[in-house]
Every structure is written in structure tokens, then in C-alpha cells.
């Protein structure tokens, strides 16, 4: 009863958490407002980019809304937030790495084809369309290695084939992609 009478600014984290678990949106908002700078600071230190830090902090707020009921209070709330923030930062890093790998994959294939990079965005889209036309194993190998940034060994584990077989599928895919891109007028 006393927690309900306290101003949200005066309420402890544990009181706000308990109220948020019961569906009190005002308490949840106060909790987010209280810890947003903490989350943003961790995110910024981890990634070093303001825009990414804001994206991470917003993602943590969303995740917090979905998982506040899971907080058991066994450790400090800030420790739980720290873990959640680091996981969101790692997720963003993996997504960024996949995006970079896709762009790099285009560069690899463009260099194989002897192509320049004038209209790289449109060419990248065409390349991924061509990848979808590859036989299943070749397509999967290219998507895992170039699209997801996995090593040949890791892709082999996913595909349940050997690393050497992944390498062979990549080699065959490059040859086939060159033909597909030429026939589409892209090379």
C-alpha cells in the first residue's frame, strides 16, 4: 500500500519492478526513464557509435517490456539490465556483420566476374536473386558463408557436411553465379 502512495521518483527499483510486473505502465515508464541513460552509456561504450547506441537502448526497452515479469530479483536490477544491453549490442553487431558480409560477398563475386562497383546496391540485389537460383546445397553454402559470415567449418556443421564439401559448393556456386549473372546481362 505504501508503494502506491510513493511518487514514482521516490519509489525504489524493486517497488517499480513489482508494480510493472502487475501491469502498471506508469511504474514501467519510470523504471525505463530512470535507467535509460545507464543502458545508453553501456551501449555507447560497447559500440562507440551514437546511432547504434540509441538503437540498442531502444531495443533494450522493448526487451525489458517483454521480460520484466521474468526478473526474479536474485541479483541487482542493473546487472540484469547490463546483461540485456550486452546481448542487444551483440545482436546488433551480428546483424551488422551479416550486412557487411553481404556487401563483401558482392565484391568477391564482382571481382570474379571482373566487374566494377558503379551501381553496387542494385547489383547486390541482382546477385542475391541469382544466389536464390542456385541448387540447394550451393545456395545454402553461399548464404551461410557470405550472407551469415560463417566459416566453411561452421557452415559444414549447419549443413551436416564436411568443411571441404562446403568449399567445393562455394567454388561451384561461384562458377554458376558467373554464368547466371552473365545471362541476366549483369556481367
Image (tube, rainbow, N blue to C red):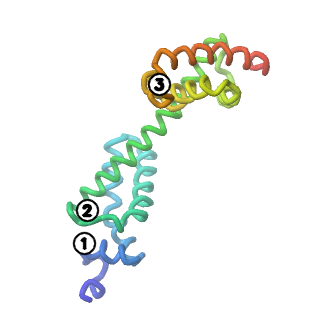
- Say which residue label 3 marks: 156
Circle count: 3
Is 138 placed left or right of 100 in the picture? Answer: right
Closer to the eye: label 3 or 1 = 3
In the rendered image, the vertical position of residue 104 relative to residue 40, given as above or below: above
Say if mark 3 contacts mark 1, CB within 8 Å: no
Q: Quadrant of the image for the C terminus? A: top right
SS state under label 2: helix
> Residue 78: x, y in percent?
25, 59
> Residue 121: x, y in percent?
65, 30
Lower sequence index among marks 2 and 3? 2
Is 36 placed left or right of 3 in the picture? Answer: right
Q: Residues within 10 Å of mark 3 (few under 14, many from 20)?
A: many
Q: Which mark is residue 14?
A: 1
SS state under label 1: helix
In the rendered image, the vertical position of residue 89 relative to residue 139, given as above or below: below
- Say which residue label 2 marks: 77
* Residue at (41, 41) in percent of width and height: 49
Q: Which image quadrant for residue 179?
A: top right
Q: Which image quadrant for residue 173?
A: top right
> Residue 165: x, y in percent?
51, 17
3D distance between C-alphas at marks 1 and 2: 8 Å
Amino acid at each position: 500500500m505504501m508503494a502506491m502512495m510513493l511518487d514514482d521518483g521516490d519509489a525504489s527499483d524493486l517497488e517499480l519492478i513489482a508494480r510493472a510486473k502487475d501491469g502498471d505502465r506508469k511504474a514501467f515508464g519510470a523504471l525505463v526513464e530512470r535507467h535509460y541513460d545507464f543502458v545508453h552509456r553501456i551501449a555507447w561504450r560497447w559500440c562507440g557509435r551514437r546511432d547504434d547506441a540509441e538503437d540498442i537502448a531502444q531495443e533494450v526497452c522493448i526487451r525489458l517490456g517483454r521480460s520484466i515479469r521474468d526478473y526474479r530479483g536474485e541479483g541487482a536490477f542493473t546487472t540484469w539490465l547490463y546483461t540485456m544491453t550486452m546481448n542487444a549490442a551483440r545482436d546488433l553487431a551480428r546483424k551488422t556483420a551479416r550486412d557487411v558480409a553481404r556487401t563483401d560477398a558482392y565484391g568477391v563475386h564482382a571481382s570474379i566476374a571482373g566487374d566494377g562497383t558503379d551501381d553496387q546496391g542494385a547489383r547486390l540485389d541482382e546477385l542475391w536473386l541469382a544466389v536464390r537460383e542456385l541448387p540447394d546445397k550451393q545456395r545454402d553454402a553461399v548464404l551461410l558463408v557470405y550472407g551469415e559470415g560463417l566459416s566453411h567449418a561452421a557452415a559444414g556443421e549447419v549443413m551436416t557436411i564436411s568443411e571441404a564439401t562446403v568449399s567445393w559448393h562455394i567454388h561451384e556456386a561461384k562458377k554458376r553465379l558467373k554464368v547466371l549473372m552473365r545471362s541476366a546481362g549483369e556481367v
